[in-house]
Amino acid sequence: MKNSIGIFLLLLLSGCYSNWENLDEVSKEITCDMDIVGLEKLAMKHEVLGQYDTVSKTYSMSKSNDVIGIVFNDKKVITVIAKTQSHSSLGGLTRRQGDVIVVKRCIG
């Protein structure tokens, strides 16, 4: 009984503190000429949450606590693609949000 409780807690914690394993690969798949429809298809392909915010003109893809942010200009052209990944320590019990890294700057 105690072993099953320990295994359950370990699985629960590892699920809560997981990272988006292919964050780098997905961020490199985004090109400057993509539109919102293309980004939505990419999000569905990789089974991540994708959402466009009309106020900030940004599209975000997220999984776990990791995010790719795509910034559009007024003409709906991508200007910046950036990512951020969280970092775990102490056996996964503490998390720290990583720095924002610009993947690509597009001329818009």
Image: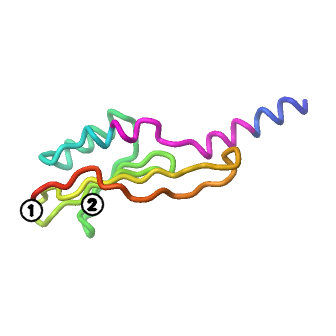
- Which residue is nearer to you in this view: 100 or 67? 100
- At x 23% / y 43%, what residue is drawn? 30
Residue sitting at 51 percent across and 58 percent down?
97
- Quick check: is 17 in the magenta stretch? yes
The residue that disc 1 covers is 75
Tell whether 44 sits left or right of 88: left
Q: Secondary structure at mark 1?
A: loop
Residue at the outermost right position: 1
Circle number at residue 2: none
Q: Alpha-carbon distance for marks 1 and 2?
A: 12 Å
- The residue where tag 2 is placed is 58
How was the colour assigned to the protein in this rendering? rainbow
Q: Is residue 101 above or below residue 15?
A: below
Q: Badge 1 local density, few (<14 within 10 Å), some, or many (20+)?
A: few
Question: Are there few (<14), some (14-19), or many (20+) residues within 10 Å of tag 2?
Answer: many
Q: Amino acid at mark 1?
A: Lys
User: Image quadrant for the N terminus?
Assistant: top right
Number of numbered discs on residues? 2
Residue type marked 2: Thr
**What are the residue bounds of the magenta stretch?**
10-25
In the image, taking residue 36 as reference, residue 63 lies left or right, namely: right
Does label 1 or label 2 sit earlier along the sequence? 2
Residue 102, how many percent across, how many down?
Answer: 30, 55
x, y percent for residue 83: 36, 52
